[in-house]
């Protein structure tokens, strides 16, 4: 017989509210779409507060609204899309900081999902660096965005998802973001491939990975 496999698993209490942040329309769904499907189905009354930095008053914003509605199901979703110019977030640091502060005052999440600090895209990285300055006492999970740059992180936290949810995420990405279909990195095989790798790393069929800057643990029991 082979050796038994031991996996250290941390389990949360039921969630009431989460905050999800992206620099561009589609970042959130690419980075944590399967996790969002799982959370909102496990907690149908979950409050989801979403902020996206760029795309206001463009077809991309409408894509994002419809996409997050599809990913969130019956959850209580509130989405804000700003007009920070794509690719120019560092030059609009003050505006991003002010918008993030205003967003923070309207939500009290148990978990915050945002880009991870090691992301090579300047807009993703700027948002990732600012999120902990406003959500100072929150668990912030940095999602990974598959793209051309070789900046895939080494995630400390892995969230297993079922094959059905992994496939649904990939299908919804193609369905909800027609403006991105045709890009050489935007296809179901790529998204499922990364999810399969993360699954292998936690003895699951599929998973999504997250980067943690800091977390506090309290051990229960005696």
Image (tube, rainbow, N blue to C red):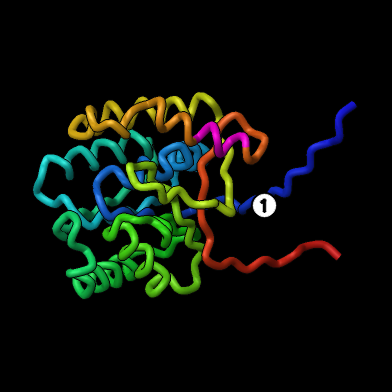
Seen in the picture, residue 70 relative to 55 is either above or below; the reply is: above
Q: Residue furthest left?
A: 57
Q: Whole-percent x and y of residue 57? A: 9, 49
Residue 199 forms part of the magenta stretch: yes
Q: Quadrant of residue 91?
A: bottom left
> Which quarter of the rendering shows the N terminus?
top right
**Magenta span:** 195-200
Residue shown at the point (84%, 36%) measured from the top left: 4
Q: Is residue 19 at least partly visible in the picture?
A: no
Q: Main secondary structure of the magenta part?
A: helix
**Foreground residue among 3 and 38:** 3
Residue 197 forms part of the magenta stretch: yes
Residue shown at the point (25%, 50%) measured from the top left: 24
Q: Residues within 10 Å of mark 1 (few under 14, many from 20)?
A: few
Seen in the picture, residue 12 relative to 186 is either above or below; the reply is: below
Side (left or right) of 203 relative to 221: left
Residue shown at the point (42%, 59%) measured from the top left: 118
Q: Whole-percent x and y of residue 110? A: 50, 60
Seen in the picture, residue 141 relative to 171 is either above or below; the reply is: below
Residue at which label 1 appears? 10
């Amino acid at each position: 017989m082979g050796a038994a496999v031991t996996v250290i698993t941390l389990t949360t209490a039921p969630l009431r509210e989460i905050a999800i942040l992206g620099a561009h329309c589609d970042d959130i769904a690419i980075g944590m779409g399967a996790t969002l499907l799982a959370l909102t189905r496990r907690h149908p009354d979950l409050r989801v507060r979403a902020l996206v930095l760029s795309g206001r008053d463009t077809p991309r914003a409408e894509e994002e609204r419809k996409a997050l509605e599809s990913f969130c199901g019956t959850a209580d979703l509130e989405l804000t899309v700003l007009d920070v110019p794509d690719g120019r977030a560092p030059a609009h640091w003050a505006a991003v900081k002010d918008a993030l502060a205003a967003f923070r005052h309207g939500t009290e999440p148990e978990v915050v999902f945002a880009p991870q600090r090691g992301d090579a895209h300047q807009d993703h990285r700027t948002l990732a660096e600012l999120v902990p300055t406003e959500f100072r006492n929150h668990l912030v999970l940095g999602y990974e965005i598959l793209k051309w740059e070789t900046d895939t992180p080494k995630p400390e936290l892995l969230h297993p998802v079922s094959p059905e949810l992994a496939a649904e995420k990939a299908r919804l990405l193609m369905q909800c973001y027609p403006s991105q279909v045709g890009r050489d990195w935007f296809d179901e095989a790529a998204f499922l491939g990364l999810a399969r790798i993360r699954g292998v790393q936690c003895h699951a069929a599929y998973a999504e990975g997250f980067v943690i800057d800091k977390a506090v643990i309290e051990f229960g029991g005696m």
